[in-house]
Image: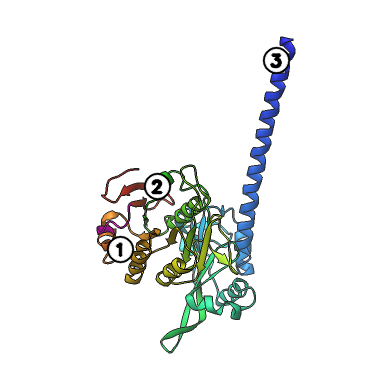
């Protein structure tokens, strides 16, 4: 009897391990499928000759941040937080003499693909200097500005393109999300980060966690003012990124106007905005907070001292309007350096 019991127990153990092994394979395959999709989304934006370089290349698209095309200039990528030239064989190199050079015709060809063969349909976005494409990737453009009545009418002779690859890191906020609550209340929070260090990625994941609910708190209604389509990355009105099930988005709307619009129209419990800095932003934040709604925002800065010395945002800090500050580490994508309370005490 005991002998049979041991055999059965052993077989069950083997079966469980096999199921776990199959699950791991399935998860890896899903990750591979997502990365293949991202690779396809990016490559189809590129001129055919440059597509070949990336298809030959061994570049890991999960680490690729930017692709820069400038007329008659070297093809450049930001890869793993470092800048490289792309050679004629598709390899990332450090020497400019080895770099592949982009032609004027290739810039024109890229714009055809980026605008889905209908530049006119994207004229409003081009006028703002960028287009959000499928997958949430943002394509910045620069060239000759056409002014009309003191406003930008169009951008012509586009000669510079910056493809910024969208990367979601689901769960990157897990280590700090618990510090942003006081029992069932959410603290007004400011994320401080140098450029290219993952502040928008962190903001997005915090929004997702707040909206869906997490181990420490119920789900809440969140309103995003996505002025540059970077948080939700809406394409044709549909968010491409996971921003949670209780999140509403004002896409392409100036932050100051959008914050007040959300309060009046969508009754959010929390409003999320990226890269605050103007007096209009500060006034809108004050308005939102006085309506009893919490704020989570980001700002460029190396440390708390630099933010305190900013002419507008520093005033909000000195008034202790934000109760939590998340500082990201320079030169390390997504690395959280510290979390401070409103008195400047390090709590993480």
Of label 2 and label 3, which has the lower sequence position?
3
Element at label 3 = helix
Give coordinates of residue 192: x percent, y percent. Answer: 36, 56
| Quadrant, the N terminus | top right
Crowding around mark 3 (Cα neighbors within 10 Å: few <14, some 14 to 19, many 20+) is few
Element at label 1 = helix
The residue that mark 1 highlights is 313
Report the front residue among 23 and 265: 265
Rendered position, 30 above or below 86: above
Give coordinates of residue 194: x percent, y percent. Answer: 37, 57
Contact (Cβ within 8 Å) of mark 1 with mark 2: no
Contact (Cβ within 8 Å) of mark 3 with mark 1: no
The residue that mark 3 highlights is 6
Residue placed at 33% from the left, 67% from the top?
Answer: 282
Determine whether, in the image, residue 69 is placed left or right of residue 334. right
The magenta stretch is 317-323
Of label 1 and label 2, which has the lower sequence position?
2
Report the front residue among 264 and 317: 264
In the picture, residue 22 is in which quadrant? top right
User: Can residue 221 be seen by looking at this rendering?
Assistant: yes
C-alpha distance separating marks 3 and 1: 67 Å
Of label 3 and label 1, which has the lower sequence position?
3
Looking at the rendered image, the disc whose residue lies closer to the viewer, 2 or 3, is 2
Determine whether, in the image, residue 229 is placed left or right of residue 46. left
Contact (Cβ within 8 Å) of mark 2 with mark 3: no
């Amino acid at each position: 009897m005991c002998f049979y019991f041991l055999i059965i127990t052993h077989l069950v153990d083997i079966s469980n391990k096999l199921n776990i092994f199959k699950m791991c394979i399935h998860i890896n395959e899903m990750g591979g499928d997502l990365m293949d999709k991202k690779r396809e989304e990016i490559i189809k934006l590129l001129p055919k000759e440059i597509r070949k370089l990336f298809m030959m290349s061994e570049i890991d698209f999960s680490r690729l941040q930017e692709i820069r095309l400038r007329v008659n200039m070297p093809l450049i990528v930001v890869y793993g937080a470092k800048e490289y030239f792309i050679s004629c064989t598709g390899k990332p190199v450090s020497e400019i003499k080895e770099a592949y050079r982009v032609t004027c015709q290739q810039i024109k060809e890229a714009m055809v693909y980026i605008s889905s063969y209908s530049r006119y349909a994207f004229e409003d976005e081009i006028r703002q200097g960028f287009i959000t494409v499928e997958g949430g990737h943002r394509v910045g453009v620069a060239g000759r500005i056409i002014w009309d009545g003191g406003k930008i009418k169009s951008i012509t002779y586009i000669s510079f393109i910056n493809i910024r690859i969208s990367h979601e890191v689901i769960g990157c906020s897990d280590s700090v999300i618990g510090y942003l609550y006081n029992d069932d209340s959410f603290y007004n929070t400011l994320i401080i980060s140098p450029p290219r260090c993952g502040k928008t990625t962190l903001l997005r994941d915090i929004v997702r966690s707040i909206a869906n609910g997490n181990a420490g708190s119920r789900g809440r209604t969140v309103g995003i003012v996505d002025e540059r389509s970077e948080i939700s990355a809406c394409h044709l009105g549909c968010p491409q990124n996971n921003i949670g099930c209780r999140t509403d988005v004002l896409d392409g709307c100036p932050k100051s106007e959008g914050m007040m619009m959300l309060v009046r129209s969508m009754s959010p419990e929390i409003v999320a905005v990226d890269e605050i800095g103007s007096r209009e932003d500060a006034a809108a934040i004050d308005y939102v907070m006085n309506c009893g709604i919490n704020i989570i925002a980001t700002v460029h800065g190396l440390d708390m001292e630099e933010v305190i010395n900013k002419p507008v945002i520093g005033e909000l800090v000195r008034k202790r309007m934000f109760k939590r500050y998340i500082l990201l580490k320079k030169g390390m994508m997504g690395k959280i350096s510290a979390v401070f309370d409103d008195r400047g005490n390090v709590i993480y």
